[in-house]
Image (cartoon, rainbow, N blue to C red):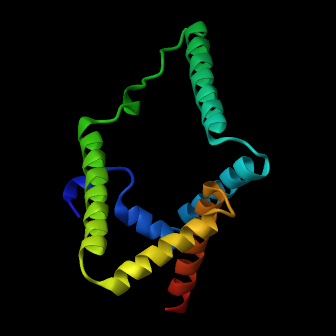
Amino acid sequence: MSTSSKSSPVSYDTVRDVFLWRRKKLSLLVLLVSTATWVSLDVYQFNLITVASWAAMFAVTSLFLYGNIARFLRKEEPDLSGLEISEQTAIEAARSVRQSIEEGVRWMCHVSAERELFLFARVVAALWLLSYVGSFWDSLSLLYIGNNLCITVTRMNTQAS
């Protein structure tokens, strides 16, 4: 891992620690937030765009009220310079996404162009099974189930070892 990724607030080590339950409070928070998101979006039939719009409206309204109340009480305005994303962080994120896409394309070309018939058949069968299972649930439910299974299985594996 590069030394520049350690300066970012969320690193691969943090993600690994969350899934391996090394940071129990953060893992529990991820589990609770994903559960609340799934309940609000799936059970109450909310749309992701609607909830994202409500969250953005809440944030903008809160900042507007806070700034006006601070100005009304003759206090200094809040310093929002910490909300900026540095150019280096944006470049690192774009580079990471590009590398992931390139690895995926290389893997797809390897599976489809090589003469490994069994690997090709397994990939096609897995994708067919995924599409079949996906026809029963929406993507949010599948992401929620996958997240919880991943956290639970890694938790059981770390306790067993």
Using the image as rendered, state which of residue 134 and residue 73 is in the foreground: 134
Query: For the point 66% across and 59% down, which residue is it?
Result: 141
Residue 75 position (above or below residue 19): above
Q: Tell me residue 56's x, y (percent).
A: 58, 30
Tell whether 26 sits left or right of 40. Answer: left
Residue 126 position (above or below residue 35): below
Which quarter of the picture shows residue 89?
top left
Tell whether 108 sits left or right of 25. Answer: left
Tell whether 112 sits left or right of 71. Answer: left
Residue 31 visible from this viewpoint: no
Query: For the point 60% across and 58% down, which residue is it?
Result: 29
Which quarter of the picture shows residue 34?
bottom right
Residue farthest to the bottom, as pictured: 161
Residue 49 position (above or below residue 27): above
Query: For the point 58% across and 17% down, which residue is it?
Result: 64
Residue 5 visible from this viewpoint: yes
Q: How many marks?
A: 0
Which quarter of the picture shows residue 99?
bottom left
Using the image as rendered, state which of residue 28 and residue 72 is in the foreground: 28
Q: Tell me residue 90's x, y (percent).
A: 29, 40
Q: Quadrant of the N terminus?
A: bottom left
Residue 65 position (above or below residue 121): above
Residue farthest to the right, as pictured: 44
Using the image as rendered, state which of residue 66 and residue 93 is in the foreground: 93
Q: Tell me residue 146's x, y (percent).
A: 58, 68
